Image (spheres, rainbow, N blue to C red):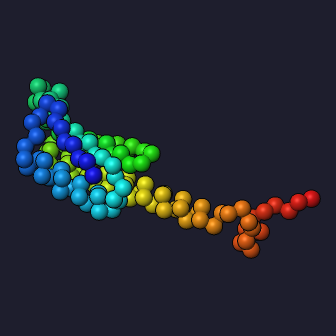
Amino acid sequence: MNVSISGHHISITDAMNTAVREKLTKVERHFDQIQSIQVILSLDNSGASDGGQKSHKAEAIVRVSGQEMFVQALDDDMYKAINEMADKLDRQVRKYKTRQERKKVQGAGRDGRYTDNDVADVAPVI
């Protein structure tokens, strides 16, 4: 799995890099067919000038065969945003994996011949 971490209006520290990589190992444990993950950590100072909080944003783009998944999380603390982003990503990956497994199971018995279970699904010919 190829992981790239970049920063926008923020420099990536070793601690941030380690936190992101540790959180993404959980995602990789659930689904091993991930091709790449691109993580963008950014700092939005738009509210800071009038006394508002700085907003830390963690975004991730995950590429699996045939699809891309995108998640983002906003928080006052960068590490909380990273944790939330990883949790959202983990939910999306597990949901994707479940869908793929269901497709595989549903398509397994379909070879063009009817079974006893399929006869009830067919409308009678008049």
Horizontally, residue 10 falls left or right of residue 23, namely left
**Based on the displayed image, in which of its 4 quarters is residue 73 positioned?**
top left
Q: x%, y% of residue 67?
A: 43, 45
Numbered circles on residues, count: 0
Q: Residue at x 22, y 39 (%)?
A: 40
State the residue lying farthest toward the left: 14
Q: With respect to residue 15, does 9 lie above or below?
A: above
**Image quarter for residue 33?**
bottom left
* Quarter of the picture holding the C terminus: bottom right
- On the image, the x and y values in percent for residue 39 come to 23, 42
Residue 65 x/y as whole percent: 42, 48
Residue at x 35% of width, y 59% of height: 31
Q: Residue furthest bottom?
A: 116
Above or below 118: residue 23: above
Do we see residue 113 in this rendering? yes
121 up-or-down from 37: above or below: below
Farthest right residue in view: 126
66 or 16: which is nearer to us? 66
- Residue at 12% over, 26% down: 50
Toward which corner of the image does residue 49 lie, by quadrant? top left
Q: Is residue 71 visible?
A: no
Is 108 on the left or on the right of 56, as rendered?
Answer: right
Q: Is residue 22 left or right of residue 70?
A: left
Q: Position of residue 88 (x, y in %)?
A: 31, 51
